[in-house]
């Protein structure tokens, strides 16, 4: 009896003690306590006070039930703080936020813990990604964010590691290499937590890899299961029944080129159905004729696969683009919702992948419900409602012609998250009109280290000059026009479209107060009316934005945060606002902070350097530019994003050209060292080609 009283009084004393010295918000103790509480139940409940998982909840709808910020008080919305991250490449991350502690990722898979109450950094974790790995990604050294679970922050790094970080201290708990480092894999996607496992995919299908997704025990890092998205060498045992079935849809010797199908972004989870949904990527190489010469659907490329999250076994799949040959990934955002369709409520998943069709699929069974074009599409005339297969246009596979195909490899919609608002019934799509010329390169041969496994950029898959060119002038008139679309998935049409100035814009957030938030490529944060797309509020962020905004409450106040960091696939080569350092902006009602000063665009000059070049040298230089440089650099009058436009290469860069291209002296900035692939003569020819192009451009 005495001991019971003793315990009682001790507890009373302890609780009195902790009451007299309140925990400091933002301290390691506070972060440890609050982040340790993040478990499966908490994520499943999806309480919007915090932003606990990538898409806000397992449905990934990015619809927040917070409504303190509303149409009626937007005149009071202002900057609470901004924070410079000291970076200069793309930021695509969705911040994770709990009780005023934000976890954000930046370029090169850097992780930041930020105190929202103060607008200051708590800790920074640098995974020290070798800069030589930068060349393994097509679309900038970006990262889309972390996962948070039981006191740990998880990040997938650009060089393929999965790292568990102590949320309170920023120190590493464990690190696992999830890929074969001798192959050009990368990770840019955010991990998800499902039933105690960290789920992570990878990228690299542009360079020749075999895609897969893996579950690791969140506590120990032990591998639980791995699901390959495409089959390996059929002479070896298949990893699963799914791979055996998939192999029947491939021809030739695809495994030598990797096959592709990398799951580099989208996931969603339905706890009731116990299904994990994953979007898979394009074929590797792009062109099916190279990869699987006798045709076939090439499962499970460009598909949504529904997996049992406990075992990783395939429950069902839906392939959006059978036999992909255009880089039509289905890695785009997947949203789960329950919709009234033909008189009954159906559990659906929705996706607007690159191929230009908006899909509604039964998420319990994988049954096709509907698919409709949300941008201009010419590769298919529709999707057969009975089979769920696209009805391809005669020229779609560019076999007898070089053809303009719409949409193209950039996608009618790319990775930028959509949002779904149950009040308006609309899915918001950051969409783009895009077209590119596709053709077969008669001289294609597999090349291990090169974009497209050997066909270079070359606007797709290469051309056959002996074949005619089929132009699509309608597609060309609207090429590279972006639009924000309010899409009704039940009536299957756009209720409204907002044309946009920049051709590459940010992801979306919608709220219960029927606001729709988006940062734009020309540097604005805009709030739209979620019902009709009318603009309600706008502020200047200085530089182009691609990342999606998030919202959350701290101490009873609603905040909206957005990270600015221009870059990504399009942002490497083009910009629509001056470049700014990586920066987080946070807004609230009565926010009155001073905006940071913005950098202005710098002058560009064409260096006057004498040179002489013959036709053979220029042709070799052009070929090298196409194969190795054009993935990141442009050579034209107006372009140039976060990666320099080579037209304006300065005299000092020209003087050090060999040591930059073949010696790796700018490796720390992400400029690869091509010394293992290009000879001194190759680089001389490349330089002559650049000088000659710049001269030609300056004369125009
Ligand atoms: Ca791709």
Image (cartoon, rainbow, N blue to C red):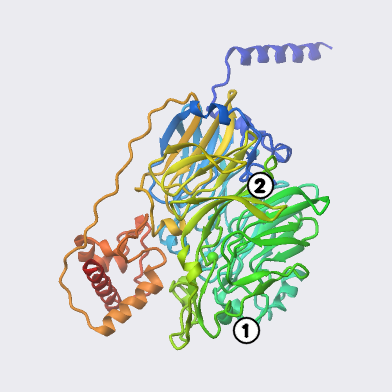
Mark 1 nearby-residue class (10 Å; few <14, some 14–19, many ≥20): few
Which residue matches tag 1?
252
Quadrant containing the N terminus is: top right
Judging depth in this view, the residue of 653 and 185 nearest the camera is 653
Q: What residue is shown at x 31% (from left), y 77% (from top)?
A: 621
| Numbered badge on residue 75 | none
In the rendered view, tell whether residue 413 sits above or below residue 673: above
Instruction: Tell me if I can see residue 365 in this picture.
Output: yes
- Establish whether ligand 1 lies closer than 8 Å to the Cβ of label 2: no
- Establish whether ligand 1 lies closer than 8 Å to the Cβ of label 1: no
Residue 296 at x, y percent in the picture: 67, 79
Q: What residue is shown at x 45% (from left), y 56% (from top)?
A: 503
Q: N-terminal of the two: label 2 or label 1?
A: 1
Q: Residue furthest bottom?
A: 466
Q: CA distance from mark 2 to mark 1?
A: 43 Å
Residue 364 at x, y percent in the picture: 80, 56
Is 241 displayed left or right of 578 in the figure? right
Is 41 displayed left or right of 478 in the figure? right
* Residue 699 placement: quadrant: bottom left
Is 195 displayed left or right of 295 in the figure? right
SS state under label 2: strand
Is 205 displayed left or right of 623 in the figure? right
In the rendered view, tell whether residue 293 sits above or below residue 30: below
Which residue matches tag 2?
426
SS state under label 1: loop
Mark 2 nearby-residue class (10 Å; few <14, some 14–19, many ≥20): many
In the rendered view, tell whether residue 198 sits above or below residue 616: above
Ligand 1 lies in quarter: bottom right
Instruction: Tell me if I can see residue 663 in this picture.
Output: no
């Amino acid at each position: 009896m005495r001991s019971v009283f003793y315990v009682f009084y001790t507890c009373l004393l302890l609780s009195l003690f902790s009451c007299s010295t309140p925990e400091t918000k933002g301290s390691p103790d506070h972060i440890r306590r609050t982040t340790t509480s993040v478990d499966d139940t908490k994520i499943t409940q999806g309480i919007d006070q915090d932003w606990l998982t990538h898409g806000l909840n397992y449905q990934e709808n990015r619809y927040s039930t917070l409504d303190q910020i509303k149409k009626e008080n937007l005149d009071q919305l202002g900057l609470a703080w901004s924070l410079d991250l000291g970076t200069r490449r793309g930021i695509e991350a969705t911040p994770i936020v709990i009780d005023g502690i934000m976890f954000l990722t930046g370029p090169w898979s850097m992780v930041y813990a930020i105190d929202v109450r103060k607008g200051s950094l708590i800790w920074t974790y640098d995974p020290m990604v070798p800069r030589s790995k930068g060349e393994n990604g097509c679309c900038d050294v970006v990262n889309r964010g972390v996962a948070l679970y039981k006191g740990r922050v998880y990040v997938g790094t650009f060089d393929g590691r999965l790292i568990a970080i102590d949320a309170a201290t920023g120190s590493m708990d464990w690190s696992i290499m999830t890929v074969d480092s001798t192959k050009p894999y990368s990770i840019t996607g955010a991990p998800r937590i499902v039933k105690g496992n960290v789920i992570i995919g990878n990228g690299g299908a542009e360079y020749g890899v075999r895609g897969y997704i893996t579950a690791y025990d969140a506590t120990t890092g032990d591998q639980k299961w791995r699901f390959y998205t495409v089959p390996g060498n059929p002479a070896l045992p298949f990893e699963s029944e799914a791979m055996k079935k998939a192999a029947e849809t491939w021809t030739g010797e695809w495994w030598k080129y990797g096959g592709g199908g990398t799951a580099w972004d989208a996931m969603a989870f339905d706890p009731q159905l116990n299904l994990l949904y994953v979007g898979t990527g394009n074929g590797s190489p792009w062109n099916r004729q190279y990869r699987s010469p006798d045709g076939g659907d090439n499962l499970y490329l460009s598909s949504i696969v529904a997996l049992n999250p406990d075992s990783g076994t395939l429950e069902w799949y839906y392939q959006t683009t059978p036999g992909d040959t255009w880089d039509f990934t289905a890695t785009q955002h997947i949203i789960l919702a329950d919709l009234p369709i033909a008189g009954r409520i159906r559990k659906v998943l929705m996706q607007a992948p690159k191929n230009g069709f908006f899909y509604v699929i039964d998420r319990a069974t994988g049954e096709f419900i509907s698919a409709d074009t949300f941008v201009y599409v010419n590769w298919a005339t529709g999707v057969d409602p009975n089979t769920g297969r696209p009805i391809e246009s005669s020229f779609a596979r560019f076999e007898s012609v070089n053809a303009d195909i719409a949409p193209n490899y950039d996608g009618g919609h790319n990775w930028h998250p959509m949002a779904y608002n149950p009040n308006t019934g609309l899915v918001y799509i950051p969409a783009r009109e895009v077209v590119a010329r596709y053709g077969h390169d008669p001289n294609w041969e597999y090349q291990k280290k090169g974009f497209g496994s050997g066909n270079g950029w070359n606007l797709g898959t290469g051309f056959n000059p002996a074949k005619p060119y089929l132009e699509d002038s309608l597609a060309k008139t609207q090429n590279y026009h972006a639009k924000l679309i309010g899409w009704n998935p039940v009536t299957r049409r756009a209720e409204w479209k907002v044309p946009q100035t920049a051709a590459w814009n940010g992801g979306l957030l919608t709220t219960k107060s029927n606001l729709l938030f988006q940062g734009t490529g020309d540097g604005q944060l805009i709030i739209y009316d979620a019902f009709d797309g009318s603009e309600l509020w706008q502020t200047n962020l200085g530089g182009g934005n691609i990342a999606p905004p998030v919202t959350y409450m701290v101490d009873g106040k609603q905040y909206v945060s957005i990270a600015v960091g221009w870059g990504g696939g399009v942002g490497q080569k083009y910009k629509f606002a001056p470049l700014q350092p990586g920066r987080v902006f946070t807004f609230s009602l009565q926010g009155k902070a001073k905006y940071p000063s913005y950098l202005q665009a710098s002058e560009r000059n064409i260096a006057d350097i004498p040179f002489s070049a013959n036709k053979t040298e220029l042709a070799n230089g052009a070929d090298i530019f196409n194969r190795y440089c054009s993935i990141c650099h442009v050579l034209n009058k107006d372009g140039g994003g976060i990666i320099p436009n080579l037209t304006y290469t300065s005299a000092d860069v020209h003087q050090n050209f060999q040591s930059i291209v073949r010696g790796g002296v700018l490796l720390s900035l992400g400029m690869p060292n091509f010394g293992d692939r290009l000879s001194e003569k190759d680089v001389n020819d490349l330089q002559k080609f650049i000088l000659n192009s710049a001269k030609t451009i300056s004369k125009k």
